[in-house]
Image (cartoon, rainbow, N blue to C red):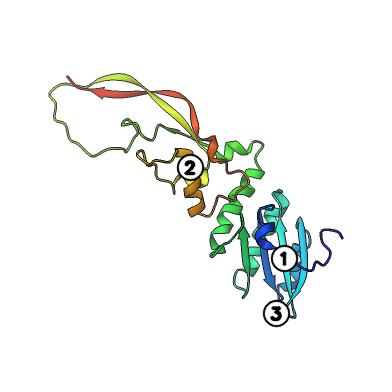
Amino acid sequence: MTKNQLAKRIDPFDASLRYMLVVVFPKSTSKNFSLVLNIAEGAEQYAVADINGKSTYFVCFGESQSDAGRAVAILDYVRTWKGVQVFSKGKLLQNSYHMAPVLNCYLESQSCRDYQAHCYKVIDDPFSEEVEGRGTLSIRVVDKPSIKHEVEMDRYLFPCNFLFNRFRFQKDHPSSIADQIQASAVKSVCDWCPNFEPVKWRKVGTRKVLKDFFD
């Protein structure tokens, strides 16, 4: 049997552990149904099963750029259909609305010569008091100009540009920063991205910062 032939059954929970995403939908009366099937047939795995006398379609998307594009197109068409289910990493996703931004982000990375240039973000030490915007507002009245000193700032690699503005560092958390990043990605429904590697969090260097000192 080839990958696109009829199948008696595909376990979407199991398949979603081996594929980027799995989308399951019943036969629809939508005018776009034929177009959706045409797109689905080109996916890494596509199958049709008879469930309770009704044709049900299983589409398993791989990590290729073309499959990611197919997933974006199909989810855009089927998101309002009844009975549509989306699976990732062994679980049924309750809201597929959040999948499109992650898929589009992944597609952008696939168009880059080096996906890391798209996905990774170099940031200042998030726990340093010298980070801009950190700390409380204070007003100092002085009768002499400040003296500027160079301070060395540690720099770190944050492994997901998509997640960065959704993530909050917790210094006193018992889990490692990498594990906090992974947990946050699960909550933000972007942990299934093939490029996501929370273990990439690490120190990557330093930079010089001028700080005001007062006598």
Compared across the picture, whether 145 is left or right of 8 comes to left
Residue receiving disc 3: 29
Q: Which quarter of the figure is the C terminus placed in?
A: top left
Residue at (54%, 35%) from the top-left corner? 200
Q: Quadrant of the N terminus?
A: bottom right
Helix, strand or loop at label 3? It is loop
Going from N to C along the chain, the mark reached first, 1 or 2, is 1
Q: Which tag is nearer the camera, tag 3 or tag 2?
A: 2
Name the residue carrying label 2: 179
The mark found on residue 58 in the picture is: 1
**Considering the numbered disc 2 on the image, is that residue within a helix, a strand or a loop?**
helix
Query: Does the CB distance between marks 3 and 2 fall below 8 Å?
Result: no
Q: Is residue 52 left or right of residue 126?
A: right
Q: Residue 80: horizontal and vertical position, in percent? A: 59, 72
Gap in angstroms between the C-alphas marked 1 and 2? 32 Å
* N-terminal label among 3 and 1: 3
Q: The residue under label 2 is which amino acid type?
A: Asp
Q: Residues within 10 Å of mark 3 (few under 14, many from 20)?
A: few
**x, y percent for residue 155:** 44, 29
Q: Is residue 184 above or below residue 215?
A: below
Q: Is residue 96 above or below residue 150?
A: below
Badge 1: few (under 14), some or many (20 or more) residues near its Cα, within 10 Å? many
Q: Secondary structure at mark 1?
A: strand
C-alpha separation, residue under disc 3 versus residue under disc 2: 44 Å
Image point (84%, 64%), residue name = 5
Q: Residue at x 33, y 23 (%)?
A: 210
